[in-house]
Image: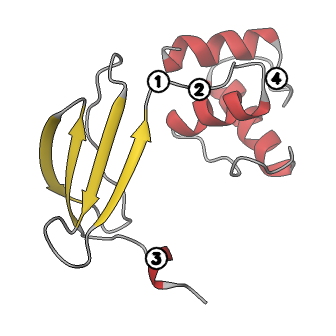
Amino acid sequence: EVLPEQRLLSDAPYRISIDGEWREGKSGPDGIIEVPVSPDAAQTEIEFFPGTKEELVFEVALGHIDPPATVTGARHRLSNLGYPCPPDGAEPDDVSMATLTQFQADQSLEPSGNLDEATQAKLVDLHGS
């Protein structure tokens, strides 16, 4: 059962503040919003259905990501680069190993599925942090 607060926010109007600068838009059919964010940005607030009784507000701290040698740090970087990963808290599994192997193959690295130093360096290089 999907609870009302867990519904997909597809085609939803939103306002987003990034370090105090507001922008408006509409989420895609998959609920994703794409907004350029400066690497220096530290805080964002997202309002879905702004100004209505259904308004939902999310505050998000920007700029923190675990080190690339950690499972969570690698997952976040892979996800940000378009490689799907299991959520935080999940144990490494075949899905994340397959994702890491695909990333390695795409980047002409040894496709071992291991988070070795060369893979960590490539993740940091492509991710920018």
CA gap, disc 4 to disc 1? 22 Å
Q: Looking at numbered disc 2 in the image, what kind of residue is underneath it?
A: Ile
Q: Which residue is mark 2?
A: 65
Viewer-proximal residue, 104 or 122? 122
Q: Residue 117 at what x, y percent from top left?
A: 79, 9
Sort mark 4 into few (<14), some (14-19) or many (20+) by Cα contacts within 10 Å.
Answer: some
Q: Which residue is mark 4?
A: 115
The disc, 2 or 4, on the residue closer to the chain's N-terminal end is 2
The residue depicted at 78 percent of the width and 25 percent of the height is 70
Residue drawn 70% across and 36% down?
102
Q: Are marks 4 and 3 in contact (CB under 8 Å)?
A: no
Disc 3 marks a residue whose amino acid type is Glu
Q: Is residue 78 above or below residue 42?
A: below
Q: Residue 120 in the image: state x and y as whole percent.
A: 71, 15
From the viewer's perspective, tell me whether residue 99 is left or right of residue 62.
Answer: right
Please report contact status of discs 2 and 4: CB closer than 8 Å, yes or no.
no
Looking at this view, is 38 or 101 the one in front? 38
Spatial separation of the CA atoms under disc 3 and disc 2: 26 Å
Q: Given this view, does label 2 or label 4 mark the residue nearer the observer? A: 2
